[in-house]
């Protein structure tokens, strides 16, 4: 896709570079992922195991996340409940200590606050080096510096006790909490910070209780790790189980596929091994029974076909001797027909014509029997095909004139040399042109030839009654006719196109047909230029160009 012309030239160049880059990336990705895509398409086991792993990963991952999240939530709620209960006791005890002082300015009040904080810390949290307790009388700190905030242990708690928390506790006079991550004493940890106002006679005091969540975080991490390891092991186990189960099912199917391939290759004695009494064993037994029935039927049909071919060949050969005798007598009678009565002379002419048809039928039967027996062989030589086409057209000109058909030759000016059997090619063309003249309905018949480096193609096009859908494959069957009731002009045997198709296959070529009701038919003969070469394409289309133009 080209970039729009209205874009600036640098932008168009950049787009072209981007397109080239993505084409290279797509090519490399396709090259590297080709084995994976091939395995995905060809292996049922790979698809089942992959889908099982994906589904189990999603399911286990969802449940694992829920369990880890719920466990961490439970640990946090328990820590909050414990800290809230502890803070409530501390507030009550601190309030009892501070109610002894009716006013803020008292020489003993700072010492009492320090003793109270130490008592709270040592009494409830002895041995827990991470817990912090702080008491603030911020409203009186300016007037009474002795009441400045005190913390045990003496560390900077500004990262934990934020202005928002102070506002909730000091100004709104209610218990508040928050979770903060801070670096205290060179150690970064997550803290659960609770603040509560402490009632006193001389004014407002806040107590802050800061408990590290190290234990809870560690427990949550351990739970996540356990869930991750357990989930991964479960997914792997499910993949292994899926692979083993799929293998149990796929292996007999693969064996059946290989056995079917051997049967199709002609090894009719191949059978599957039956083990056990389960469904797979039933499948193997049914497959073996089917193979045995097919073998019996194929052997019987081959024997019948062999007998039929032998009968056709023997009858054709045996009829040659009496036909020769009858032919000699008929030729003698035919040569003397002018001396007979008109009725007898007409009978002699009919006898001669029917003997010609009978001899053609025997010749075709003998040729068919040679094809069936595999005795047909090519006598290939480098031949110019243009004179062959011209010779066929000249020999059928008389028949074409009688039925009102004009033969139009469209041949190259230069010779068309191919390694073929000229006798067989001429027979094919004689059958094709003869059928086109017979079915041409007094309309022109075009014979076209062209060639390229690998193949030669010859088409014979008529404009007669044409072929119905599906008949383009039936025309090459033996003794098949599109309209059995129509009178014959050429006295055909019904074997011409079948023999022509065998001649084309013997050359390694194609003989194909196209037709449409009321639009005529076209036959295409395609032959390799060099004997033994494999055809890939034909130089001429099978469907006539005029028909293609109408459709498009």
Image: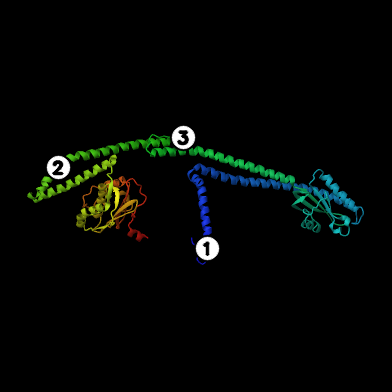
| Pointers 1 and 2 in contact (C-beta within 8 Å) | no
Q: Is residue 294 above or below residue 522?
A: above
Label total for image: 3
Mark closer to the chain start, 3 or 2: 3
Marks 3, 1: nearer the viewer: 1
- Residue pushed farthest left? 339
Q: Secondary structure at mark 2?
A: helix
Q: Nearer the viewer, residue 14 or 263?
A: 14
Q: CA distance from mark 1 to mark 2?
A: 88 Å
In the picture as drawn, the residue positioned furthest to the right comes out as 107
Which of pointers 1 and 2 lies earlier in the amino acid sequence? 1
Rounded to the nearest whole Å, what is the CA distance between mark 3 and mark 1?
Answer: 66 Å
Which residue matches tag 2?
Answer: 326
Mark whose residue sits in front, 3 or 2: 2
**Can you identify the residue that label 3 sits on?**
281
Q: Which residue is mark 1?
A: 12
The location of residue 533, given as percent across then percent down, is 35, 47
Name the element at disc 1: helix
Gap in Å between the C-alphas at discs 3 and 2? 66 Å
Q: Nearer the viewer, mark 1 or mark 2?
A: 1
């Amino acid at each position: 896709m080209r970039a729009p012309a209205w874009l600036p030239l640098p932008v168009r160049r950049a787009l072209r570079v981007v397109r080239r880059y993505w084409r290279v990336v797509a090519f490399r990705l396709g090259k590297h992922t080709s084995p994976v895509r091939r395995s995905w398409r060809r292996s049922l086991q790979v698809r089942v195991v992959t889908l099982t792993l994906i589904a189990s990963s999603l399911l286990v991952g969802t449940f694992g996340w829920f369990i880890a999240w719920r466990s961490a939530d439970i640990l946090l709620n328990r820590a909050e409940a414990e800290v809230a209960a502890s803070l409530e006791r501390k507030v009550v005890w601190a309030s009892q200590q501070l109610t002894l002082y009716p006013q803020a300015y008292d020489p003993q009040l700072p010492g009492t606050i320090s003793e109270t904080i130490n008592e709270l810390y040592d009494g409830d949290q002895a041995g827990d080096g991470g817990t912090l307790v702080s008491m603030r009388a911020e409203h009186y700190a300016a007037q009474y510096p002795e009441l400045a905030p005190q913390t045990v242990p003496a560390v900077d708690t500004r990262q934990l006790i934020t202005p928002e928390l102070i506002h909730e506790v000091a100004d709104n006079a209610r218990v508040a909490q928050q979770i903060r991550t801070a670096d205290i004493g060179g150690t970064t940890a997550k803290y659960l910070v609770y603040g509560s106002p402490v009632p006193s006679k001389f004014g407002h005091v806040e107590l802050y209780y800061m408990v590290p969540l190290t234990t809870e975080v560690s427990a949550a991490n351990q739970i996540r790790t356990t869930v991750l390891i357990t989930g991964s092991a479960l997914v792997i186990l499910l993949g292994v189980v899926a692979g083993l189960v799929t293998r149990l099912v796929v292996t007999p199917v693969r064996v059946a596929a290989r056995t079917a391939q051997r049967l199709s290759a002609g090894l009719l004695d191949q059978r599957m091994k039956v083990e056990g009494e389960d469904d797979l064993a039933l499948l193997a037994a049914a497959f073996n029974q089917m193979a045995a029935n097919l073998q019996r039927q194929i052997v019987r049909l081959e024997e019948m076909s062999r007998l039929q071919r032998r009968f056709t060949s023997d009858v054709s050969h045996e009829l040659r001797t009496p036909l020769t005798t009858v032919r000699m007598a008929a030729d003698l009678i035919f040569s003397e027909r002018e001396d007979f009565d008109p009725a007898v002379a007409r009978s002699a002419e009919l006898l001669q014509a029917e003997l010609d048809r009978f001899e053609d039928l025997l010749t075709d039967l003998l040729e068919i029997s040679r094809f069936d027996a595999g005795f047909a062989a090519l006598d290939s030589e480098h031949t110019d095909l243009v004179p062959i086409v011209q010779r066929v057209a000249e020999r059928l000109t008389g028949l074409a004139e009688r039925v009102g058909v004009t033969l139009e030759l469209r041949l190259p000016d230069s010779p068309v040399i191919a390694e073929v059997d000229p006798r067989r090619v001429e027979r094919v063309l004689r059958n094709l042109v003869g059928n086109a003249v017979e079915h041409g309905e007094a309309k022109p018949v075009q014979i076209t030839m062209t060639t390229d480096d690998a193949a030669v193609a010859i088409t014979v096009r008529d404009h007669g009654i044409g072929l119905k859908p599906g008949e383009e494959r039936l025309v090459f069957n033996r003794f098949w006719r599109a309209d059995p009731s129509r009178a014959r002009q050429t006295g055909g045997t019904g074997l011409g196109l079948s023999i022509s198709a065998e001649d084309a296959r013997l050359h390694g070529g194609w003989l194909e047909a196209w037709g449409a009701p009321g639009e005529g038919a076209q036959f295409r003969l395609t032959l390799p230029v060099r004997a033994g070469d494999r055809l890939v394409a034909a130089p001429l289309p099978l469907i006539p160009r005029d028909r293609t133009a109408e459709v498009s």
